[in-house]
Image (cartoon, rainbow, N blue to C red):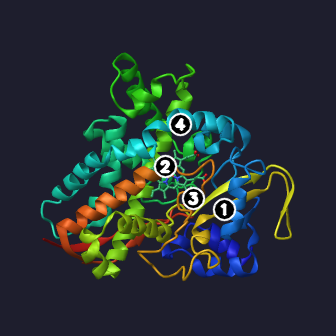
């Protein structure tokens, strides 16, 4: 197995940090790189250049999401049972996306700002003046969880459990979050469940109950809205609703959480930036949040499958080959970004791909995530005059999600 294949595929690699040197080398010398997989995987093409990833994302007729969007292979039965919006191509994808998009449009999200701010303040108040705590556990995990709970109309007392279930799914490669570590235990009995994890059954059961309750007594939340027929009288069936619920719990929490942590890391490294935050105008804040998103590159890749034989940079990609789009590499491509390894809070333009590309699968929660990040940064800077590291941090074990899962900090309250 090549050295870069071993580095890129191993979950352990990322406990030390993103292997930027390997991506830089691949971008320069092997931008469409055949990558071997351990343990019987059949290998995949690694795309590491921004333009190639853009091309693959825009040409869904050549690069499909239907056969899976995670690195590992799934057979047809597994993919079918686990299909969410993410594993669809148009026209099926466009139809479902239209049915679920309303609560996530810029206009809808704009209307959430006051409640996000209220929740952010509540998170900080709950610290009860503490000066030393784990930022991940006490702050970054809390806001996305409360926001999702609010959107879905779920009771506060269920949220901690719900997010721990989402963590077990996304964290299916980190033993801290699940008993069913994908590359260390036999998970074949759960192959038809999201993330190959029995935890999905608990989420399905919970979601089914919440939906049934709303069928009897409709409420004013996103779940009730999803039960309504659209203008053409179409309704979502139960398996689609359950998979979408699981997708929101899994996709909306730890992504926002780890990006928030990456932001805090930058504020610790650049105290003058943190001090300036309360005076920043809307544009400056927007640029800052986007640079944090680029820098963090929390979802490091998504996968596509070749639909018909094609060529890229002289390599022959065959029908059925897996192609991994390394978003984390595109975000540091020196042909796209000036001094990519420099954190520039005022970087403009900043066409990062942390939410995917401007194409069919662009993150549905992008506006919501941006809002949560901005408001939390603003509220932290209003509440604290300084923040510093207070002990060793720990990174998540995953080749999919990049993030710091523990960050002890010391703050000074204003
Ligand atoms: C900083 C936070 C977030 C990051 C970095 C992120 C990242 C991404 C990326 C890269 C994709 C594209 C997948 C692909 O290329 O196949 C995606 C899709 C998606 N995200 Fe996010 N996400 C974030 C927050 C959220 C939130 C808050 C929600 C919902 C509450 C959400 C829901 C979704 C959904 C439903 C999709 C699938 C869209 C589709 O396939 O049409 N995400 N996200």
Helix, strand or loop at label 4? It is helix
Look at the image and tell me in which quarter the N terminus lies. bottom right
Look at the image and tell me in which quarter the C terminus lies. bottom left
Residue at (17%, 60%) from the top-left corner?
127
Provide the residue designation for mark 1.
325
First in sequence: mark 2 vs mark 3: 2
Q: Measure the C-alpha gap from mark 2 to mark 3.
A: 15 Å
Mark in the foreground, 2 or 3 = 2
Q: Position of residue 194 (x, y in %)?
A: 56, 43
Position of 286 with respect to 80 (left or right) is left
Provide the residue designation for mark 4.
243
Q: Measure the C-alpha gap from mark 2 to mark 1.
A: 21 Å
Which residue lies most toward the top here? Answer: 216
Q: Which mark is residue 184?
A: 3
First in sequence: mark 3 vs mark 1: 3
Q: Is residue 105 above or below residue 215?
A: below
* In contact (CB < 8 Å): disc 2 and disc 1: no
């Amino acid at each position: 197995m090549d050295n870069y294949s071993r580095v890129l595929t191993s979950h352990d690699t990322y406990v030390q940090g993103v292997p930027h040197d390997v991506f830089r080398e691949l971008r320069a010398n092997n931008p469409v790189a055949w990558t071997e997989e351990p343990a019987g995987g059949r290998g995949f093409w690694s795309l590491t250049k921004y333009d190639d990833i853009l091309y693959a994302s825009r040409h869904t007729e050549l690069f499909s999401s239907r056969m899976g969007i995670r690195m590992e292979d799934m057979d047809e039965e597994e993919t079918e049972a686990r299909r969410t919006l993410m594993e669809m191509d148009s026209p099926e994808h466009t139809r479902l996306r239209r049915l679920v998009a309303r609560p996530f449009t810029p206009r809808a999200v704009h209307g959430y700002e006051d409640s996000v701010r209220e929740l952010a303040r509540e998170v900080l108040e709950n610290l009860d003046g503490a000066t030393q705590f784990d930022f991940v556990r006490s702050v970054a995990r809390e806001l996305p969880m409360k926001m999702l709970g609010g959107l879905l109309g779920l009771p506060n007392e269920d949220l901690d459990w719900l997010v721990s279930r989402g963590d077990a799914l996304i964290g299916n490669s980190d033993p801290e979050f699940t008993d069913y570590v994908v590359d260390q235990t036999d998970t074949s009995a759960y192959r038809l469940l999201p993330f190959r994890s029995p935890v999905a059954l608990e989420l399905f059961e919970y979601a089914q109950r919440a939906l049934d309750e709303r069928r009897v007594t409709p409420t004013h939340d996103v779940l009730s809205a999803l039960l309504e027929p659209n203008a053409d009288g179409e309704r979502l069936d139960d398996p689609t609703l359950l998979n979408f619920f699981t997708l929101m719990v899994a996709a909306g929490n730890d992504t926002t959480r780890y990006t928030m942590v990456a932001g805090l890391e930058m504020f610790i490294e650049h105290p003058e930036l943190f001090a300036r935050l309360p005076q920043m105008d809307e544009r400056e804040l927007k640029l800052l949040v986007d640079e944090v998103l680029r820098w963090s590159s929390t979802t490091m890749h998504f996968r596509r499958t070749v639909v018909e034989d094609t060529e890229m940079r002289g390599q022959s990609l065959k029908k059925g080959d897996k192609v991994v789009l390394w978003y984390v590499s595109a975000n540091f491509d020196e042909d796209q970004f000036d001094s990519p390894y420099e954190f520039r809070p005022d970087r403009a333009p900043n066409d990062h791909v942390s939410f995917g590309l401007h194409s069919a699968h662009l993150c549905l929660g992008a506006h919501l995530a941006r809002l949560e990040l901005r408001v939390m940064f603003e509220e932290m800077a209003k509440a604290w005059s300084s923040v510093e590291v207070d002990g060793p941090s720990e990174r998540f074990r995953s080749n999919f999600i990049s993030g710091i899962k523990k960050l002890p900090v010391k703050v000074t309250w204003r």
